[in-house]
Image (cartoon, rainbow, N blue to C red):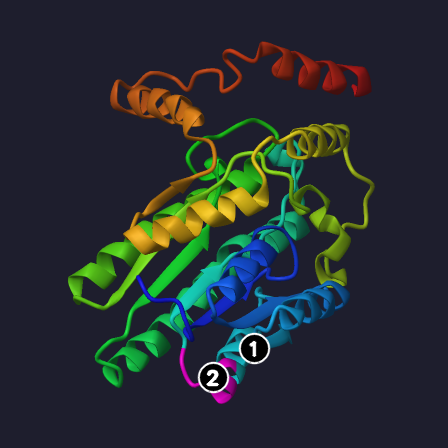
Amino acid sequence: MKNFTNRVAVITGGASGFGREFALIGARLGMKLVLADVQQDALDSVKAELEALGAEVLAVRCDVRHADQIQALADATMARFGAVHLLFNNAGVGSGGLVWENTQADWEWVLGVNLWGVIHGVRIFTPLMLECAKTDPEYEGHIVNTASMAGLLNAPTMGVYNVSKHAVVSLTESLYQDLRLVEAPISASVLCPYFVPTGISQSHRNRPDDVANAARPTISQLAAQAMSDKAVSSGKVSAAAVAEMTFAAIGSDQFYVYSHPQALGHVQKRMEEIITQTNPGDPYAGAEHVREMLQAKLKAGA
């Protein structure tokens, strides 16, 4: 995708983090913007910020777990702008703890946002984009799904999140191949950030009541939350920098987008273990202090 001016971008999770940064770049490039988020006050604030920059903005409160709300987002987009060229399936939440201690509500919430949100986006928007392409001989489209390095690795106390993000990587690779198969003028990328300062470690602030936990957090969940808070807040690569990388990838039709390419050594090691049938190694090799800190927290609460 080379031309962004006057093209329409739809961004879920658009009120903060990567979503807000995607929108700011889109505004700078002269795009028409559709922002979806569950947090109304943040959505209103970003809409005002973008309109002050001269962008045309449609803001829609949307819980991506629900197909009917994604369909309403698509309908509102077409009614306002008449096309979709760039889709960011970006909304995401995090949850940690020993995998057997995660409740059904944890699984429903994280998979609902991180995986089903992307599934709904792909299922509803891709046919719409293909229809747009039929009426515009110069049509260019692109879909970016936000996964994570957790979609390529499996650190402990991150099981629910890992599962959701591995599925997004697989879904996006499948989407890319299917689009190539039908020779569509649409491509796809998967964004795999590592620890970047965004609000994801505090995503429980927007956790809906229907997937709330009645019980208090376990020791492992508290430990995982503390580790996540520290890792995310201390990240050196900004969300703005990741958004710039992502738009560069869209422009060059690059599929895999990494915020921290240096972490790919761990991915290579994991692939080698799979090929050689070696038992999974320590994901904290080279950073043993992290594992030791986590184990200490678990033992202290045992």
The N terminus appears in which quarter of the rendering?
A: bottom left
Q: Is the residue 260 above or below the residue 47 in the image?
A: above
Q: Residues within 10 Å of mark 2 (few under 14, many from 20)?
A: some
Name the residue rendered at 41%, 56% in the picture.
144
Name the residue rendered at 61%, 55% in the picture.
108
The verdict on residue 78 being magenta is yes
Q: Residue furthest bottom?
A: 79
257 left or right of 220 in image: left
What's the residue type where badge 1 is placed? Glu
The C terminus appears in which quarter of the rendering?
A: top right
Contact between labelled residues 1 and 2, with CB atoms less than 8 Å apart:
yes
The dominant secondary structure in magenta is: helix
Secondary structure under badge 2? helix
Q: Residues within 10 Å of mark 1 (few under 14, many from 20)?
A: some
Q: CA distance from mark 2 to mark 1?
A: 10 Å
Q: Which callout, 2 or 1, points at the residue further toward the start of the chain?
A: 1
User: Which residue is label 2 attached to?
Assistant: 81
Q: Position of residue 242 (x, y in %)?
A: 50, 44
Q: Position of residue 194 (x, y in %)?
A: 52, 35
265 left or right of 22 in image: left
Residues rendered magenta in the picture: 77-83
In the rendered structure, find residue 56 and report the number of the disc placed on it.
Answer: 1
Q: Position of residue 77 (x, y in %)?
A: 50, 80
Name the residue rendered at 55%, 63% in the picture.
12
The verdict on residue 266 being magenta is no
Name the residue rendered at 35%, 63% in the picture.
142
Q: Position of residue 22 (x, y in %)?
A: 52, 57
What's the residue type where badge 2 is placed? Phe
In the rendered structure, find residue 8 and report the number of the disc placed on it.
Answer: none
